[in-house]
Image (spheres, rainbow, N blue to C red):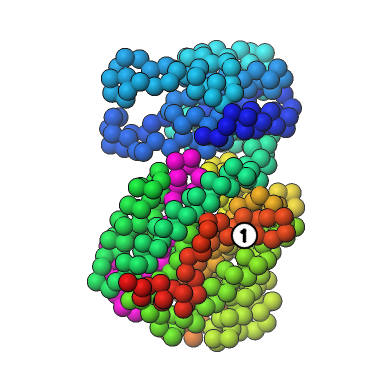
Amino acid sequence: MFSRNIYVARRQRLIKSVKDGILLFLGNSEAPSNYADNQYIFRQDSTWLYYFGIDQPDMAAVIDVESGQETIFGNDVDIDDIIWMGPQPLVASRAEEVGVAGTAPLSELEKVVKAALAKGRKVHFLPPYRYRNMMLLHSLLGIPFDRLKTEASVEFIKAVVEMRLVKEPCEIQQIDIACNLGYAMHMAATQIMKPGMLEQDIVGVMEGVVISGGYMVSFPTILSQNGETLHNHSHHQILTEGRLTVIDAGAEIASHYCSDFTRTLPSGGRFTQQQKEIYTIVSEANNLALGLARPGISYKDVHLAASRLMLQGLKNLGLVKGDVDEAVAAGAAGLFMPHGLGHNMGLDVHDMENLGENYVGYDDTVTRSSQLGLGSLRMARVLKPGNVVTDEPGIYFIPALIDKWKAEGTCKDFIAFDKLDAYRSFGGIRIEDDLLITENGARLLGSKRLPRTVEEVENAMSEE
Ligand code: GLY
Ligand code: MN
């Protein structure tokens, strides 16, 4: 948790961006996995953490925008809780640590919200994503379940997004720590990977590094020799010489700040010539984005520049034809990279995605494309100092997608479909770093960069 004045200043700034009414914040509750007392690891809501810091289940808060009055709602533990969980600080003392003077039992929340509604005041709430909070909002506000997301307060969402998009120095320090743990996680994989091991063996070692050094993985680990499946969570294959393994994994530390790195390793320690050629294009695109990212450029333009570089590289190999700028404009890159270049990262690995991707990654100046790939770009805005984004270009050969485009004639003037037959079992390559936008450029987060070039990767894998 940060110091009290950080949370006080954030809340003071927040209420200046909202005209009137009350702001309703809901923390998360424990979530059962297979029966009530067997729960998933507790994960607090990130916006709650940002404004109130308290990493405990079953809490809510109300800020009265006009009077400035702040109240945290939560129940003190009873003797039964103490027997099972040990003594816990009182809600009032937790609230005091984050500069909130008013506290009340959770049962009081309903009275406060209903009193505001009775006076015709606006109750601002954020889009819920957990069923328990949907039920709570439904019972507090009477809004049908299927309208809870659309009736969330756009004013509140935009105010939160503007603040959380620009990271404070204390947050950057935490993200650097999360990146260092992510680095250790990936290096563990790089150093042990050998043909004959199971993909799951590597997953276990990587997640062990995170659990012993942090809180949990920042998202379910993606590790597969079928890297052409973008989010492949099946880890049952035996590592085989000549194949590539995509590893997309990150760490979440105790403060809940995240990292997210991807590396693509040759399962046997050495790239084939064909793999080197494609790998080099992706690593150059990753480096190009690092060099271009700076305040004033939109991340959509960085995505397009990386796409251009990749299409030029594929043209040099004979897989793409025609004018490269026209190929970019036609969306030909989507065949090879059907995802965006990156996303915001912070307290969530896809930061604030629960508030709505278009509010987070887009604004009045940048609109979402409908093209495959570019249309999945989660962060398209003009960059500002303090933004934290991922830089994750990739090239994948997805047989079903190639067949579909070929049959439909999609981008037929730009894709040499006949040359793609030799790549049908190639898999995919993705390389991801985490960037902080600085005053005049961007820097890599974490103190060391994971091995990235062909030579760096092969050397790191051959070290005993
Ligand atoms: N690291 C997974 C993703 O960015 O979607
Ligand atoms: Mn990512």
Q: Nearer the viewer, residue 339 or 384?
A: 384
The one nearer the camera, 254 or 322, is 254
Predominant secondary structure in magenta? loop
**Does 236 sit left or right of 72 as displayed?**
left
Start and end of the magenta stretch? 236-258
Judging by the rendered image, the residue that carries numbered circle 1 is 443
Query: Which residue appears at 48% of the width and 40% of the height?
Result: 255
In this rendering, the answer to whether 254 lies above or below 383 is above
Q: How many residues crowd mark 1 within 10 Å: few (<14), some (14–19), many (20+)?
A: some
Where residue 198 sits: x, y (%)? 26, 65
At label 1, the amino acid type is Arg
The residue closer to the viewer here, 266 or 439, is 439
Residue 96, horizontal then vertical, whole percent:
55, 21
- Give the quadrant of residue 439: bottom right
Identified at 61% across, 12% down, the residue is 115
Q: Does the magenta stretch include residue 257?
A: yes
